[in-house]
Image (cartoon, rainbow, N blue to C red):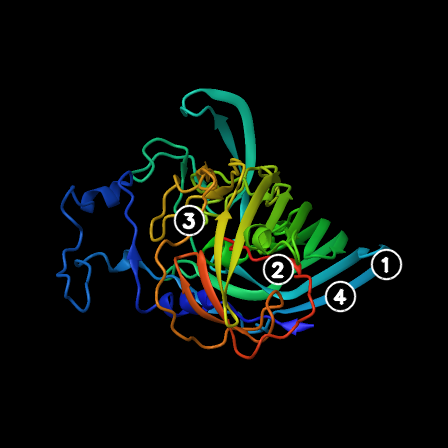
Amino acid sequence: MFYVRIPQIYNSAIATENGITDAQVFLNNSNYYDHQVFPNYPNPLVSCPVTAASCSLPAGFTEGITNNVSAFAPNFVTPRVQQTSLTLEREVADHTTVAVSYLYVHGEHLIRALDVNLPQPVALTYPIFDSTGSIFQNGYYTVDSFATWQYTQSLTCPFPPCINPLGRPIAQLGAIDEFQSAASSVYNGATLSINRRVARGTYLRLAYTYARAIDDGQDALVAGEPATVQNSYAPNAERGPSVTDQRSRFVAAFSAEPRLFHRGHELLGHIFNDWKLSSIVTAGSGRPVNATVSGDPNQDGNYDNDRLPGYSRNAFTGPDYSSTDLRLVRKIHLGQGCRLEFTADSFNLFNRDNQRHHHIRRPHRRSHYLHAIQHDRRQRHLPRLLPAASKFYEAQRRLRPPPNPTRPENDFLIGSWGADTPVRYFCKAAPRRRVPHVSPPLRDMGFLFR
């Protein structure tokens, strides 16, 4: 069991949304009274110098000012995580082992944001129109709304029915986001792995994981800001697949450093020995996607937490993922215990189009156009092969780096050049001595992950 550090994003929200330093005023141009004072483009409502220490609204706008507040709940406690694992491993053949492992992780007192300055919701029924908004689709959906409807004609509602402005219990304030330590999460995962360690520097590992992760509170680091629940009076309705839930994942890693020629074939050994080929293949099922709707149907003043009616949080699954990375290393011994390494890396070798769904978020801007879903095609590019540096710079001694199990302890890095270090220069800190070969673990395959 260990306690989780509170992300800085929550402390920043509390520091900026304290109800004193920031204030905002909202004008609805379709409202009769707001229309009388609505500024004409391009004239701003308030014009203040850039160097002004403060900026005040004109007289008559003081009643429309609202302040948002963020604060930790009085009974807030530090989140904690309990973790349990069990592994059974057996050697089935020479240099080959099969392992079955189980991992259980339970998060308690996780952070969840609720807007506590909302009235009791009422069930309202909305008609369903087509994308043009003009053709009725002969359907309705019900939403727990925090605002009421007006069915009589007035200056503020010339064409009823209309949605009345949100009446908050504390009218002088806007949203009051309370960060509670009331969410929880559960992860269950089982992994089957096969490890093959062969002499002469060859290593192979295959692993398949089947897992499931559920929670009832979206993580702020994933959402980009403290994300409030859809209905503050029913926070348990947020329970669903976690944003990091991935049911299936397969990883295959391979590393080979053959030495084909030995004594008596020194020339061929200098040409064909001292090469190292490494590869890692990753494939996984899609991750959850949260389907949201535009227009703030529940009228809580938050345009980012309205889900598609009839579906829970993260009810859909995005596309799967697959990638193959490759590394080729050439070692050149320079004598006196020094060597030069040239590396070439290729990421997404087969140029697979890996698509990811995520929300387009624009900070400091509230609009019902925020909830667009796009394809992230940044993974689609030609396989990138890093060229070896053509210029050798004078080596300068550096501090000893952290120990690397793929390199003897008495090696230290003299120089490294290029953004992805295609050239590295190693020297011995002591006279050369024989070091037993150690097969590198999966995390030290020598890849540069991005």
**Numbered badge on residue 391:** none
Give the x, y percent position of residue 29.
26, 41
Q: Mark 3 — residue?
A: 387
The residue mark sitting in front, 4 or 3, is 3
Say which label, 2 or 4, has the lower sequence index.
Answer: 4
The residue mark sitting in front, 2 or 3, is 3
- Categorize mark 2 by other alpha carbons within 10 Å: few (<14), some (14-19), many (20+): few
Q: Which image quarter is the N terminus in?
A: bottom right
Tags 1 and 4 touching, CB below 8 Å: no
**Residue shown at 58% from the left, 56% from the top:** 274
Task: Looking at the picture, tell me which residue is in the foreground, 441 or 328.
Answer: 328
Please, what secondary structure does the residue beneath circle 1 have? Answer: strand
Task: Looking at the picture, tell me which residue is in the foreground, 305 or 104.
Answer: 104
Tags 2 and 3 touching, CB below 8 Å: no
Please, what secondary structure does the residue beneath circle 4 have? Answer: strand
**Residue shown at 64% from the left, 49% from the top:** 245
Say which label, 2 or 3, has the lower sequence index.
Answer: 3
Amino acid type of the residue tagged 4 in the rendering: Thr
Task: Looking at the picture, tell me which residue is in the foreground, 414 or 168.
Answer: 414
Please, what secondary structure does the residue beneath circle 3 have? Answer: loop
Q: What is the spatial separation of the Cα atoms under label 2 and label 4, in whole angstroms?
A: 22 Å
Say which label, 1 or 4, has the lower sequence index.
Answer: 4
Q: Mark 1 — residue?
A: 90
Amino acid type of the residue tagged 1 in the rendering: Arg
